[in-house]
């Protein structure tokens, strides 16, 4: 079981993607890759809002929408947890589909900056630790 204090979420205020959506996508990816398993707790709204310096309502909106999707559930006394109904592990192809929008954005930005694919791939490998 993951300790909610170790769930690491990041935002990019200048990305053009609403913060609540950035958070939702990160949590979806963490669930899809089994970094978060059914029953695992998430940090409280207050903890994340403080950590990221954002309005607590933004975090609450993300959690509520993920709850409506069935990915999260509220548990009295524990806050938000990954839904125990969500026991299906996603295939590699499904996880890549979740990553596709970010890859498309990276490709677009690399083209705009006139950075060739070899350099982009080299940077990705360095940052992924490959």
Image (cartoon, rainbow, N blue to C red):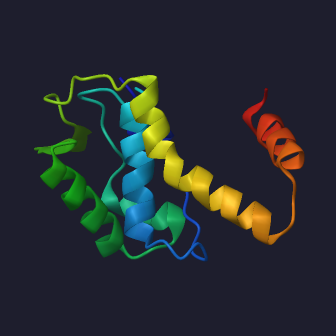
For this view, does 21 lie left or right of residue 117? Answer: left
Quadrant (top left, top right, bottom left, bottom right) of the C terminus:
top right
For this view, does 13 lie left or right of residue 89? Answer: right
In depth, the one of 58 and 128 nearer the eye is 128
Quadrant (top left, top right, bottom left, bottom right) of the N terminus:
top left
Residue 45 position, x and y percent, is 32, 60
Residue 3 appears in view: no
For this view, does 1 lie left or right of residue 77? Answer: right
In depth, the one of 11 and 97 nearer the eye is 97
Count of all numbered marks drawn on residues in the image: 0
For this view, does 50 lie left or right of residue 84? Answer: right
Residue 100 position, x and y percent, is 51, 47
Q: Who's the residue at 15% across and 44% down the image?
A: 70
Residue 87 occupies which quadrant of the picture?
A: top left
In depth, the one of 31 and 57 nearer the eye is 31
Please tell me whether residue 27 is drawn above or below residue 85 in the rendered image: below
Please tell me whether residue 111 is drawn above or below residue 7 in the rendered image: below
Residue 3 occupies which quadrant of the picture?
A: top left
Residue 38 occupies which quadrant of the picture?
A: top left
Q: Who's the residue at 16% across and 28% down the image?
A: 84
Residue 77 position, x and y percent, is 15, 43
Residue 44 position, x and y percent, is 32, 53
Q: Who's the residue at 39% across and 23% down the image?
A: 91
Residue 81 appears in view: yes
Q: Who's the residue at 87% across and 66% down the image?
A: 114
Please tell me whether residue 53 is drawn above or below residue 40 in the rendered image: below
């Amino acid at each position: 079981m993951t300790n909610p204090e170790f769930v690491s979420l990041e935002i990019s205020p200048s990305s053009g993607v609403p913060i609540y959506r950035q958070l939702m996508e990160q949590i979806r990816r963490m669930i899809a890759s089994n970094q978060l398993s059914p029953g695992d707790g998430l940090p409280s709204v207050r903890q994340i809002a403080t950590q990221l310096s954002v309005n607590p309502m933004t975090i609450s909106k993300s959690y509520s929408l993920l709850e409506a999707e069935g990915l999260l559930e509220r548990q009295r006394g524990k806050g938000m947890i990954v839904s125990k109904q969500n026991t299906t592990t996603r295939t590699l192809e499904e996880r890549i589909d979740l990553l596709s929008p970010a890859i498309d954005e990276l490709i677009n930005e690399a083209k705009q900056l006139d950075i060739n694919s070899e350099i982009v791939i080299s940077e990705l490998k360095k940052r992924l630790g490959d």
